[in-house]
Image: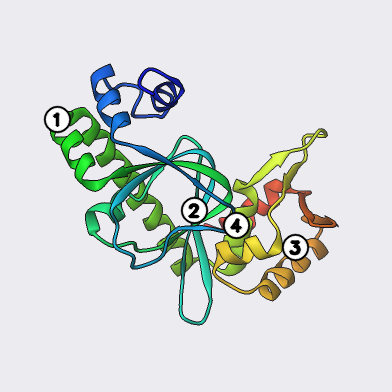
Amino acid sequence: MVNGPDYHFLQTIPGFSCLSDEALRDLLVRCRKKKFRSGQHVFYQDDPMEHLYIVEMGLVEIYKSDINGRKVTLWHVEAGQAFCLANLFAGRAFANALVQDDSLIFCLPRRDLDWVLTKHHELALHFITCVSSKLAAYATLLEDFTFKSVQERLIKILLTNSIPDKDKIPVCRLSQSELACRLGTCREVVSRSLTKLKNEGLLDTVSTGKVSRIILKDPARLQGLGDPS
């Protein structure tokens, strides 16, 4: 509903907050909201792309895979973020989009997006910024995969995905399977790398049922190992 909860949600999205009321209304009336269940794909790699997506609630994993089932997680899209912009103008998806938590997602058809961009140039500038940030993210991923070892990339992921606990000790809650997907390797390689770092006194691992925690005991030394330059 225009000026309702959906309208106010769009106002909270970075880049959309500076749009005029008219531009937001034009955007909203052309969107439809769709529910996706955990484990459902929004689209697959090489699918024709016909919509821009904006996550209102939930979490979406963007990943690439090959015919052998190997998988690399590129990034995650959280509530308040748009995705599939570069895919949309390329015509086909260059990655897969998998819903990891039950999600509500706004879907804006390409033809309606074209109309809105033609009428509201300020939105086009925002989308150029979004595409540029993704290009920068891809450049960083390429650099890491090309020039960094598995251990260096693992340490970087641990450091950037850790949150201080009640004792202010950084803790990463990614499972070994999730780490393997982000590294583009197998779980056994992750296990060996974690064991090596654990034996060196740099971290500790705790598993309780399905909950995994990696405690970073010496973040400063880890930082040095992860960025030897």
| Mark whose residue sits in front, 1 or 4 | 1
Amino acid type indicated by mark 1: Lys
Residue 17, percent across and down?
Answer: 36, 22
Q: Disc 4 and disc 2: Cα gap in Å?
A: 20 Å
Amino acid type indicated by mark 4: Gly
Residue 188, percent across and down?
Answer: 70, 75
Question: Which residue, given by chain and number where applicable, does mark 3 sit on?
Answer: 197
Disc 3, SS = helix
| Mark whose residue sits in front, 4 or 2 | 2
Residue 3, percent across and down?
Answer: 38, 17
- Tell me which label, 4 or 2, sits earlier in the chain: 2
Q: Disc 3 and disc 1: Cα gap in Å?
A: 55 Å
Disc 1, SS = helix
Residue 75, percent across and down?
Answer: 49, 53
- Tell me which label, 1 or 2, sits earlier in the chain: 2
Q: What is the number of the mark on residue 52?
A: none
> Does residue 200 appear left or right of residue 93 in this picture?
right
Question: Which residue, given by chain and number where applicable, does mark 4 sit on?
Answer: 226
Q: Disc 4 and disc 3: Cα gap in Å?
A: 11 Å
Amino acid type indicated by mark 2: Trp
Q: What is the number of the mark on residue 119?
A: 1
Amino acid type indicated by mark 3: Leu
- Tell me which label, 3 or 1, sits earlier in the chain: 1
What residue is rendered at 39% in x and 27% in y?
Answer: 10
> Does residue 187 appear left or right of residue 200 in this picture?
left
Question: Which residue, given by chain and number where applicable, does mark 2 sit on?
Answer: 75
Disc 4, SS = helix
Q: Disc 1 and disc 2: Cα gap in Å?
A: 31 Å
> Does residue 1 appear left or right of residue 228 in this picture?
left
- Tell me which label, 3 or 2, sits earlier in the chain: 2
